[in-house]
Each structure stands twice: as C-alpha cells, then as structure tokens.
Image (spheres, rainbow, N blue to C red):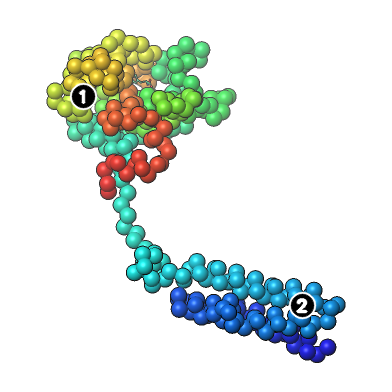
Amino acid sequence: MEGLQDQFAAIESLMTDVKAFPVANAAELEQFRIKFLGTKNVLKDVFAEIKNVPNERKKEFGQKVNELKQLAEQRFAELELVYKNAGNTTTGNIDISMPVNTAAPGSRHPITLMKDELMAIFTKIGYTAIDGPEIEDDWHNFTALGMPEDHPARDMQDTFYVQVNPAVLLRTHTSNVQIRVMEELTKSGKQPPVRIVALGRTYRNETISARAHCTFHQIELLYIDEGVTFADMKQTLLYLAQELYGAQTKIRLRPSYFPFTEPSAEMDVSCFVCGGSGCAICKHTGWVEIGGCGMVDPVVLENCGIDSEKYTGFAFGFGLERMAILKYKINDIRLFTENDLRFLKQFEQL
Ligand code: DAH
C-alpha cells in the first residue's frame, strides 16, 4: 500500500527534522516546542493517520509514531536544560550563558598555617629545613633511635608495615630525619654542628576518632654541637612557646622517657587561653602539654658515627595537629583531613 509507505517515510523525515532543528537560545527553544510539541504540532498529521492504517500494521505504525513523539520530548528536555533560562537574569533565574567566575578564593589549611609559622620561627634563628622520607626502613625509624627489635617502646607507636622482611614501614614519627641527617653528615666525612628542622607527615595504626588519627604531622628539631646543654634546649623551647603563643607564655618541663633521649622531658606551656588561671582548654590545670624533648642519647650519636664524648645535643618532636587544635580551638582532629569547605573557609583567605 503506497500511502502507508509514504506515512512511514513522513515519520522518518520528521525524526530527522527533530534532530536537526537548530536551537541556540531560549527563543529558538520556544520555536522547537511550538513546532514539535505545541497544540498545532507537526506530529499531529501522522498521529491522525493511525486510524487509517490496516490492522495488521497498526502496531508497527503506532510504535513508530510513539518513537517520534518520545524523540521530540527527549530532545526538548535536553535543550531546555541548557537554554531555558539563558538570557533571563531579570526573573532571578541563573543566566548560564554568563562567563564563569573563576576567581573564587581558596584559603590556607590550618596545618599549612602552623607549618609556615613554625618554619619561620626556626629558620630565623639559623635552623635549616630538611625533608625526610615517609616510607622508611626499620633502622632509621626504630633501631638507630635506640629501639631495636623487641624493644617495648615500639608498642607506643603502632606501625603500618608496607613490607615485613626486610621491614619497610610508614614512619611513625619525624625522628627518622635525625638519623638520616647525622648519617649523611658523617658519611661525607664531616662532624657537627648540626642544626635542622624537619616537618612532615607521619603515620600510626590508630583507630580514627575525634582525638586520634592514622595520619598527622610532626615538627622535629635537632641541634648537635660541642657543649650543647639542657639549658640550651630549655631556652629554645621558651623561644618557641613565646613566638607561638605570646611573650607572656611560660614553659615547664616534666620528666619523661624516650628511647632516643636521656634525660627526656615533656614540655607544657602556660595556658594561652586563660593565662594559667584554669579553663576548659587546660582542663583547669593552667598548663597545656605540647610534646616530647630531650638530650640526644649518646647511643644515637654513636649509631650515626658521631663522637659522643665530644658532641652533645638536644632534639624535640611535636605534633602539629595538637598545636593547631589548641591555637584555633578545633574540637575534632578528623576535620583536618575531611576537606569540608565550611571548616576550611574559616582560615586565612588567599
Ligand atoms: N618521636 C617522638 C614521638 O613521636 C617525639 C619526640 C620526643 C621527638 C622526644 C624527639 C624527642 O626528637 O627528643 O612521640
């Protein structure tokens, strides 16, 4: 039946029209709608033809007509997403044809702020910034620091092992940099002075909570020379505390233990929130714990080829997250790694 073939051909050609109809703005979108979906749309003729199609081909014809209608609707929906509101700013709609504002400023991460501040404090008095590897061997992370295999102090630092034999691990502290720096020095035939600051990421196999995380940052200081004393360490720590928290800040050192220092201490600073009178931050003690320090154990010096009869030194290692939590009054350590813009935007805008 010739007429029927023509009708099928008419559907095909309408499909081509739908696909080819040029739309580049809201006005042309409206033209499209009127032509293919409006009350007097061009599909009506083929719809009207359905009743004339012989029964045995009605189903086939009906399917084709439906296909055409769906094509028109789908195409319209796609174009509408793009062009509906174009050029229509006065109605309060978004004009998506406007150029994008790419100048949205970011802000510095609180850990970066701490890092920059600490680096400035120590480079100002002659310390050199050094980087060390985050993937480390057993010797540099443990053994050379006075923690041979089976030493109970290893339990204090739950470790992520990348490989067991020979041990390759994610460093549990930045103290590995002490060993690397001293080894490097003596391998090239030199002896102290050594005066370095290392700052970087560390890892421990901890359950993540508001107080603990499996990844955090530490700052490590190492000063070795002839005649370096505990008093030098104390003065350097006081300088750090006053630079960070203000000239009125006091420090106190409590005896402690680390396998790589002797004697060892924990440093507290007078509470910079209440000034020492007692508040929630210092848990009403007037003091806030910052981290560990001590005189480098002679065994550590000897492990690195430094004459411990001639040279002495001090070291300390503090957690940056802890310092930032105190400084910016942050109540959950997980915020540092979640990249929540509501948190990040509160810090120095770039
Ligand atoms: N490495 C120790 C830790 O992660 C911190 C530390 C304590 C570093 C005393 C030192 C130090 O350099 O002297 O817990």
Left or right of 319, for residue 287 = left
Which of the pair 249/55 is nearer the observer? 55
Residue 341 vertical position relative to residue 39 in the rendered view, above or below: above
* Residue at x 36% of width, y 64% of height: 92
Where residue 213 sits: x, y (%)? Answer: 44, 28
* Residue at x 48% of width, y 24% of height: 206
Residue type highlighted by circle 1:
Phe
If you read the primary sequence from the N terminus, does the residue marked by circle 1 or circle 2 appear first?
Answer: 2
Where residue 282 sits: x, y (%)? Answer: 27, 19
Q: Secondary structure at mark 1?
A: loop
Please report contact status of discs 1 and 2: CB closer than 8 Å, yes or no: no
| Residue, disc 2 | 61
Tell me the crowding category of disc 2: few under 14, some 14 to 19, or many 20 or more residues within 10 angstroms, Cα based.
Answer: many
Quadrant holding ligand 1?
top left
Where residue 157 sits: x, y (%)? Answer: 45, 20
Which of the pair 295/240 is nearer the observer? 240
Residue type highlighted by circle 2:
Phe
* Residue at x 70% of width, y 73% of height: 66
Left or right of 306, for residue 250 = left
Q: How many marks?
A: 2
Image quadrant where residue 308 sits:
top left
Q: Is residue 150 visible?
A: yes
| Residue, disc 1 | 272
Residue 149 vertical position relative to residue 136 in the rendered view, above or below: above
* Residue at x 26% of width, y 15% of height: 284
Where residue 211 sits: x, y (%)? Answer: 40, 25
* Most distant residue in the bottom direction: 2
CA–CA distance in space, label 1 to label 2: 83 Å
Which of the pair 105/295 is nearer the observer? 105
Q: Is residue 297 visible?
A: no
Residue 9 vertical position relative to residue 291 in the rendered view, above or below: below
Left or right of 329, for residue 75 = right
